[in-house]
Image (cartoon, helix red, strand yellow):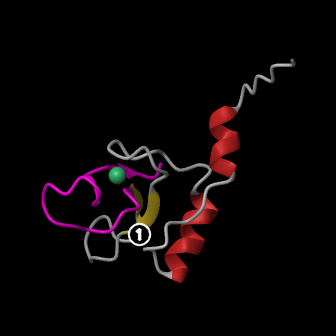
């Protein structure tokens, strides 16, 4: 029996990543476009989604990564975790 060892397991898996259904169509496209390079959120280990600061202020237009999950009740482990990272 031949044992295949894939050195790039993480990349391989993430190439097949599917956008979560709870995202809107626009968010799903954004998610898929960036999922391969996205950092993984800390709680769920899922590719983060990229968002842009829309609030007027010093960071307007700046991009950042957050957990891709929807907001939920406080303490709900399936809801958005507090992962946040600026896009460099
Ligand atoms: Zn998360």
Q: Residue furthest left?
A: 74
Residue nearest the viewer, comparing 31 with 63: 31
Q: Indicate left or right for 56 with 27 as reference.
A: left
Percent of width and height locating residue 5: 76, 22
Percent of width and height locating residue 81: 27, 53
Percent of width and height locating residue 76: 19, 57
Residue nearest the viewer, comparing 52 with 3: 3
**Residue 2 to residue 78: above or below:** above
Number of labelled discs? Answer: 1
What residue sits 43% from the left and 74% below the top? 22
Helix, strand or loop status at disc 1? strand
Q: Residues within 10 Å of mark 1 (few under 14, many from 20)?
A: some
Quadrant occupied by the N terminus: top right
Q: Indicate left or right for 26 with 11 as reference.
A: left
What residue sits 46% from the left and 50% below the top? 46
Q: Is residue 78 found inside the magenta-colored segment of the image?
A: yes
Q: Is residue 73 found inside the magenta-colored segment of the image?
A: yes
**Boundaries of the magenta span:** 66-88
What residue sits 63% from the left and 64% below the top? 33
Q: Indicate left or right for 50 with 30 as reference.
A: left
**Residue 54 to residue 49: above or below:** below
Secondary structure mostly taken by the magenta-highlighted segment of the chain: loop
Question: Image quarter for residue 11?
Answer: top right
Residue where numbered disc 1 is placed: 52
**Residue 81 to residue 72: above or below:** above
What residue sits 14% from the left and 54% below the top? 75
């Amino acid at each position: 029996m031949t044992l295949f060892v894939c050195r790039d397991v993480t990349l391989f898996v993430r190439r097949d990543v599917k956008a979560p259904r709870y995202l809107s169509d626009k968010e799903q496209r954004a998610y898929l476009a960036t999922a391969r390079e996205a950092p993984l959120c800390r709680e769920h280990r899922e590719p983060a989604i990229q968002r842009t600061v829309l609030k007027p202020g010093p960071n307007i237009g700046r991009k950042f990564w957050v957990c891709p999950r929807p907001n939920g009740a406080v303490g709900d482990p399936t809801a958005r975790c507090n992962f946040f990272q600026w896009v460099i």
